[in-house]
Image (spheres, rainbow, N blue to C red):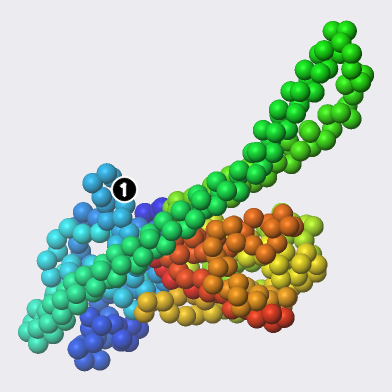
């Protein structure tokens, strides 16, 4: 994170730079142009601290391009995300009135272009104009009321979503624990039986070596089959525990990253191809514009890997096939979101299986070594740290489309 090192974009600020900015919408075009003439434009890279909590408030800022994070310090010395501001939004507007200390820090989440208006210059402009001052005070008081109401509504909605997601995750974890105990019972039982058999062989060998009567000395062939049984079933138990750990890991917060969702998806596809060279699955990213996203890239990568593996194993039965990746704009709970779709053109899914696809340990390919945890991990991750939704659309012979709907910003 860098300090506020900025570069001016030019010596002349366009007169219409404040058009469309809510704080100044009641001003006439001439009044907005007069205000704009007293400010300056600057560019700043991602990570720049544009203002610090506790510093003296000396200027208003209008975000012309890019996205910024608003954070506050907590009692433990950490930072709490308060929200984000996008192009056209203001921050530090109360500085125009009271000049007090900043109540939050503002950090560039992406490269930004910012219009800065010094408080003293602004007051010198509007002091002789009671009309302009009245317009500003009305707008600021309305903004405070709107923000207060929105904060209450958003907090209630957030608490509801968190409670619903927590309940869903608890149900999932209960199913996983129950299923894990059932699934582990078989390989561990085989391991115990095999170990007991090996002990009997060892005791028989000891008797023969001591002059007892037996079928002959032990050979490597005598141990080959029980050793293979132990190895296979212990590997199965390890795989189950790792899958359980993966579901638990879905609830851990990774660092937030500002990235391009399309590029993150392409990188996940490339990594999957490197890690699974034996799977003849081609992942194609459909073209489109950049998709700025602030989220948890490692969690998204985990979800996509499971979806690619499902397409290869179930859509195409291990044979050659293509999975298409598409990203489109969408809305989630009234906020900007991304719709990421993974589509294959394989066998499809019978309607009777659709309601239980994301249940832990549900699989139609247990005989081929599948455990039925991939979609459970994907669902838990999408509805947990990614704060989104996962939908599946499929028909026998018509392929499968898995859609991830998630906010563009937390």
Q: Position of residue 278 (x, y in %)?
A: 79, 57
Q: Is residue 225 found left or right of 94 in the rendered image? A: right
From the image, tell me which residue sits under label 1. Answer: 78
Q: Position of residue 353 (x, y in %)?
A: 60, 72
Instruction: Residue at 59%, 57% (x, y): give it.
Output: 361
- Name the image quarter holding the C terminus: bottom left
User: Quick one: 16 or 205, which is closer to the camera?
Assistant: 205
Instruction: Residue at 43%, 79% (x, y): give it.
Output: 331
Q: Position of residue 4 (x, y in %)?
A: 36, 58
Instruction: Residue at 36%, 54% (x, y): give it.
Output: 3
Residue 95 in the image: above or below residue 217:
below
User: Quick one: 193 or 22, which is closer to the camera?
Assistant: 193
Question: Residue 298, located in which quarter of the rendered image?
Answer: bottom right
Q: Is residue 41 visible?
A: no
The extreme front residue here reads 213
Instruction: Residue at 73%, 75% (x, y): give it.
Output: 346
User: Quick one: 147 or 207, which is closer to the camera?
Assistant: 207
Q: Is residue 355 found left or right of 50 in the rendered image? A: right
Q: Is residue 294 found left or right of 322 in the rendered image? A: left
Question: Residue 90, located in which quarter of the rendered image?
Answer: bottom left
Q: Residues within 10 Å of mark 1 (few under 14, many from 20)?
A: few
Q: Is residue 213 visible?
A: yes
Total numbered labels placed on residues in the image: 1
Q: Position of residue 35 (x, y in %)?
A: 23, 81
Label 1 sits on a secondary structure element that is: loop
């Amino acid at each position: 994170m860098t300090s506020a090192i900025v570069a001016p974009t030019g010596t002349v600020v366009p007169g219409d730079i404040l058009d469309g900015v809510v704080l100044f919408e009641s001003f006439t075009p001439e009044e907005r142009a007069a205000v704009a003439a007293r400010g300056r434009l600057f560019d700043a890279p991602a990570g720049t601290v544009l203002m610090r909590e506790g510093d003296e408030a000396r200027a208003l800022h209008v975000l012309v391009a890019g996205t910024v994070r608003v954070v506050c310090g907590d009692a433990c010395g950490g930072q709490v995300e308060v929200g984000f501001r996008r192009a056209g939004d203001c921050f530090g507007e109360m500085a125009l009135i009271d000049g007090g200390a900043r109540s939050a820090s503002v950090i560039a989440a992406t490269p930004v272009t910012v219009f800065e208006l010094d408080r003293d210059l602004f007051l010198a402009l509007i002091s002789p104009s009671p009309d302009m001052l009245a317009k500003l005070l009305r707008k600021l008081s309305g903004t405070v009321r709107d923000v207060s109401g929105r904060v209450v509504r958003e907090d209630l909605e957030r608490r509801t979503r968190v409670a619903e997601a927590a309940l869903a995750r608890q149900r999932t974890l209960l199913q996983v624990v129950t299923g894990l105990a059932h699934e582990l019972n078989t390989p561990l039982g085989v391991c115990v039986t095999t170990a007991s058999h090996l002990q009997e062989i060892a005791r028989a060998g000891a008797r023969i070596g001591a002059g007892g009567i037996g079928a002959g000395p032990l050979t490597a062939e005598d141990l080959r089959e029980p050793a293979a049984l132990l190895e296979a079933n212990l590997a199965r138990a390890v795989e189950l525990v790792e899958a359980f750990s993966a579901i638990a890991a879905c609830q851990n917060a990774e660092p937030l990253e500002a990235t391009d969702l399309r590029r993150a998806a392409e990188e996940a596809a490339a990594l999957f191809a490197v890690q699974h060279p034996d799977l003849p699955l081609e992942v194609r990213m459909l073209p489109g514009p950049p998709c700025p996203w602030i989220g948890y890239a490692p969690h998204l990568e985990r979800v996509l890997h499971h979806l690619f593996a499902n397409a290869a194993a179930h859509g195409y039965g291990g044979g050659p096939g293509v999975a298409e990746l598409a990203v489109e704009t969408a809305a989630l709970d009234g906020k900007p979101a991304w719709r990421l779709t993974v589509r294959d053109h394989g066998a499809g899914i019978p309607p009777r299986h659709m309601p239980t696809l994301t249940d832990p340990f549900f699989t139609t390919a247990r005989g081929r070594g599948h455990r039925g945890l991939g979609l459970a991990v994907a669902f838990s991750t999408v509805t947990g740290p990614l704060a989104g939704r996962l939908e599946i659309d499929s028909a026998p012979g018509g392929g499968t489309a898995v859609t991830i709907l998630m906010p563009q910003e937390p």
